[in-house]
Image (spheres, rainbow, N blue to C red):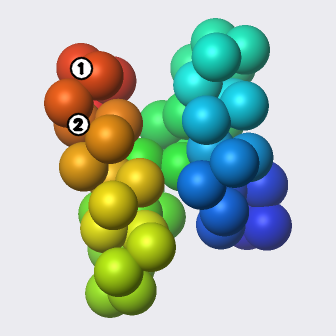
Amino acid sequence: LTLCMTWKRCVFIYKSQFIQLLIFCCTINFTARTQQAQSIWNFLKRSGNC
């Protein structure tokens, strides 16, 4: 869970192309209700990974 809870780590996972973790990250951000999670979700959505 902690792997994907911050923007920096989320971007690190994205840049490292760990697709399974990225999908896990997307799932967390999609279900989360915080502003930070929503902004990460939007970033991943724009990058075409969600």
Q: Which mark is residue 48?
A: 1
Q: Say which mark, if any, is on residue 28.
A: none
Q: Position of residue 6 (x, y in %)?
A: 66, 62
How packed mark 2 is, by other alpha carbons closer than 10 Å (few <14, some 14-19, many 20 or more), is few
Can the viewer see residue 48?
yes
- The quarter holding residue 2 reads bottom right
Q: Quadrant of residue 13?
A: top right
- Where does label 2 land, which residue? 45
Q: Residue at x 29, y 22 (%)?
A: 47
User: Residue at 24% of width from left, 49% of height from top?
Assistant: 42
Q: Looking at the picture, how far across and down is residue 44, in whole percent?
A: 35, 36
Q: Amino acid at mark 2?
A: Lys
Query: SS for tag 1?
Result: loop
x 72%, y 31%: residue: 12
- Against 42, residue 20 (above or below) is above
The N terminus: image quadrant: bottom right
Q: Nearer the viewer, residue 44 or 30?
A: 44
Q: Is residue 12 left or right of residue 37?
A: right
